[in-house]
Image: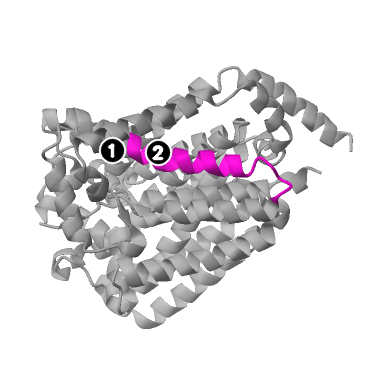
């Protein structure tokens, strides 16, 4: 019975390892036969190293939650498909290539060191995570109604009302904020002008008013959608209706954009994962539909938002958004020419804290990176960040921190019995896991302030007393399964 309770039985899970090996081989052969320049030979070793890791790594045993699954897929893409796209785009970059060319192969080595360390950590955590957390994912729905009847998510609802009230107050004081902060994706105009107009407006709002607004309004984006989805799916007898209404909520959540555009995508994935687990007997239909939706969103984003028209522009976007080797090489160049020292990590943390960062004048390493090269919107890759502070043998430390944090949120997901908090923990897991994919440690710190800390605060308050009662309920359910 135990094997039927594990996530590996979700449709498509068993194809992950063969797909990883196939993509690694295709990318490796393509690059090995095409790239002959010594300065860029390191790009061949990215798919080669992932091929070795994908053969050794035990997917069934060591992918124990959504966080580890996302991290696995992130490295799969970063080391196979994306290097191929960067090569096909002829290494298009926003900085002169002769500046980073001497460091490109070193950047690939650093990325490989980080990846190997991450998979060693995933293997260790996978072997230590107890099977009971897998069981909780599946059978928690058997106890959730009983527990939810005793422990209400009253603080979550109170937070929603409080945030709504504060947002209405801010819109009353600054009417332009409603239209300047939000956009509808299908009516999207000039993004740069919209951002400049928003920054001009924000400059006129005191920080002690604006930052609580930003925090509360981004949390509302999650909480309102979560509340509606859970409410819709309370009655499992009206499945077709539930899916239609949930789809409407997801589309509305995706369509509403702020300056934190990634949040619109994360909430959709959070809703999808909740529905996949809740209606796991329909996993073939759900996963197939999700693949179709993902392709549609990818094409939509490429065509409408990223303005990608050829392989060069595609390679540039992949490099800039997904922690590629060119930006990592630029981080190595900056370390050679502008080294601020390990103590600047304190400034990275302070800069992420609203008001305090401004008062102290703290400048993050990411800001220094962009200013040093006059590189607007640049993101210092996670591996480059680690190398800048800790060198070769510590370049993996930021990514390891991300893996450990994702593991914590996975455990909290398995432990909570309330559907609202299952989606909340899913959102936290997604947010932190994609850090190895498209964030760095500076953004990771900021996400703690604006997302993780307030949501964890609500989780702790609303789940007081649930653990002991829930543990009893789960023992009863486990006993039920064991006697079958």
Q: Which segment did they paint magenta?
A: 216-238
Q: Is residue 347 visible?
A: yes
443 to the left or right of 153:
left
**Is residue 116 shown in magenta?**
no
The residue lying toward the viewer, choosing from 445 and 101, is: 445
Q: Residue at x 40, y 34 (%)?
A: 452
425 to the left or right of 130:
left
Q: Which residue is mark 2?
A: 220
Categorize mark 1 by other alpha carbons within 10 Å: few (<14), some (14-19), many (20+): some
Residue 384 placed where, x, y %? 27, 51
Q: Quadrant of the N terminus?
A: top right
Categorize mark 2 by other alpha carbons within 10 Å: few (<14), some (14-19), many (20+): some
Label at residue 84: none
**Is residue 224 shown in magenta?**
yes
Residue 67 placed where, x, y %? 51, 45
* Distance Cα–Cα, label 1 vs label 2: 10 Å
State whether residue 57 is above or below residue 82.
above
Q: Which residue is mark 1?
A: 214
Residue 42 placed where, x, y %? 33, 67
């Amino acid at each position: 019975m135990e094997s039927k309770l594990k996530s590996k039985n979700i449709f498509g899970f068993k194809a992950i390892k063969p797909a990883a090996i196939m993509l690694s081989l295709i990318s490796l052969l393509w690059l090995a036969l095409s790239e002959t320049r010594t300065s860029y030979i390191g790009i061949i070793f990215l798919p080669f190293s992932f091929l070795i890791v994908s053969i050794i790594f035990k997917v069934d045993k060591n992918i124990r939650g959504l966080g580890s699954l996302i991290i696995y897929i992130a490295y799969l893409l970063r080391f196979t498909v994306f290097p191929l796209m960067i090569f096909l785009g002829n290494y298009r970059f926003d900085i002169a290539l002769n500046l980073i060319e001497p460091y490109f192969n070193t950047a690939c080595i650093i990325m490989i060191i980080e990846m190997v360390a991450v998979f060693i950590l995933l293997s260790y955590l996978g072997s230590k995570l107890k099977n009971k957390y897998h069981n909780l994912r599946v059978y928690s729905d058997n106890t959730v109604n009983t527990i939810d009847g005793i422990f209400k998510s009253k603080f979550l609802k109170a937070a929603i009302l409080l945030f709504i009230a504060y947002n209405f107050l801010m819109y009353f004081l600054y009417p332009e904020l409603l239209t300047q902060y939000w956009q509808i994706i299908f009516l999207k105009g000039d993004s740069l002008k919209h951002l400049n107009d928003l920054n001009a407006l924000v400059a006129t709002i005191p920080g002690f008013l604006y930052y609580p607004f930003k925090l509360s309004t981004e949390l509302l984006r999650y909480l309102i959608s979560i509340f509606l989805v859970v409410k819709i799916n309370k009655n499992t007898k009206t499945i077709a209706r539930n899916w239609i209404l949930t789809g409407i909520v997801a589309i509305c959540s995706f369509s509403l954009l702020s300056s934190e555009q990634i949040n619109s995508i994360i909430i959709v994935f959070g809703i999808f994962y909740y529905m996949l687990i809740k209606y796991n007997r329909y996993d073939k239909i759900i996963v197939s539909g999700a693949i179709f939706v993902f392709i549609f969103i990818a094409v939509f984003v490429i065509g409408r938002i990223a303005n990608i028209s050829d392989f060069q522009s595609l390679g540039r976007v992949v490099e800039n958004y997904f922690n590629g080797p060119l930006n990592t090489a630029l981080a190595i160049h900056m370390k050679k020419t502008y080294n601020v020292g390990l103590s600047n990590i304190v400034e990275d943390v302070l800069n992420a804290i609203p008001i305090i960062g401004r008062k102290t004048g703290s400048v993050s390493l990411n800001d220094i990176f962009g200013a040093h090269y006059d590189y607007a919107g640049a993101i210092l890759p996670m591996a480059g960040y680690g190398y800048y502070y800790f060198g070769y043998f510590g370049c993996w430390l930021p990514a390891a921190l991300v893996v450990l944090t994702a593991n914590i949120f996975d455990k909290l997901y398995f432990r909570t019995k309330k559907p609202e908090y299952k989606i909340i923990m899913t959102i936290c897991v997604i947010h932190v896991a994609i850090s190895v994919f498209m964030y760095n440690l500076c953004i990771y710190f900021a996400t703690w302030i604006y997302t993780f800390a307030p949501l964890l605060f609500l989780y702790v308050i609303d789940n007081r007393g649930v653990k002991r009662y829930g543990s009893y309920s789960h023992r009863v359910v486990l006993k039920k399964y064991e006697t079958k």
